[in-house]
Amino acid sequence: MNAYLPHQCCPENRLFCGGQPDEAQLADFAAAHPGGCVINLRPASETGDWDEAAVAKRLGLAYASVPVAGPQDLTQANAAAFARALEAHRGSPMLIHCATGQRVGALLALKAAWVDGCGTADALVAGRSGGLTALEPQVLDLLSRR
């Protein structure tokens, strides 16, 4: 399996989750998965000095953004927005990232619980398969309130 992302994991076939890719990694992903999609969970304040959306478009990749700055943005609204982005590109290879992969795993868990109706244990399995580790206590706290 090619590593398109730092801390990459693949919870499902053609779903690559992890940290921030660079331009070369995006190009590798695009070459291996034509017509794929990038879902970026980083807010504009974290994007640095390159235009990831423009690079993705130039490479023939669809691009979606669901800005999640940190634990304070682990909300039902953002889980629903994430679910809509996933659904809009269902069937396409997807590269989903934040800075390290933690927010990816957290949103996978919250989407599983809040959108898909999974129980806490199954939601945590979904999150862990997508890289959830450090944000697990916050996710557990949020899930315990539902």
Image (cartoon, helix red, strand yellow):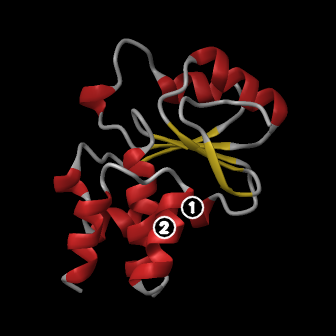
Quarter of the view holding residue 51: top left
Amino acid tagged 1: Leu
Residue 75 in percent (x, y) is at 25, 65
The CA span between labels 1 and 2 is 5 Å
Q: Is residue 115 visible?
A: no
User: What is the quadrant of the C terminus in the image?
Assistant: bottom left
Amino acid tagged 2: Ala
Residue 141 in percent (x, y) is at 20, 71
**70 or 83, which lies in front?**
70
Label 2: how many Cα within 10 Å (few below 14, some 14–19, many 20+)? many
Work out whether 6 lies above or below 10: above
Work out whether 13 lies above or below 56: below
Q: Residue at x 29, y 31 (%)?
A: 44
Q: Residue 46's mark? A: none
Label 2's element? Answer: helix
Q: Residue at x 49, y 59 (%)?
A: 128
Are discs 1 and 2 less than 8 Å apart at CB?
A: yes
Label 1: how many Cα within 10 Å (few below 14, some 14–19, many 20+)? some
User: What is the quadrant of the N terminus in the image?
Assistant: top right
Q: Which residue is mark 2?
A: 83
Q: Residue at x 51, y 30 (%)?
A: 53
Q: Residue at x 23, y 81 (%)?
A: 144
Quarter of the view holding residue 90: bottom right
Q: Which residue is mark 1?
A: 86
Label 1's element? Answer: helix
Tell me: 106 left or right of 92.
Answer: left
Work out whether 14 lies above or below 23: below
Residue 32 in percent (x, y) is at 83, 33
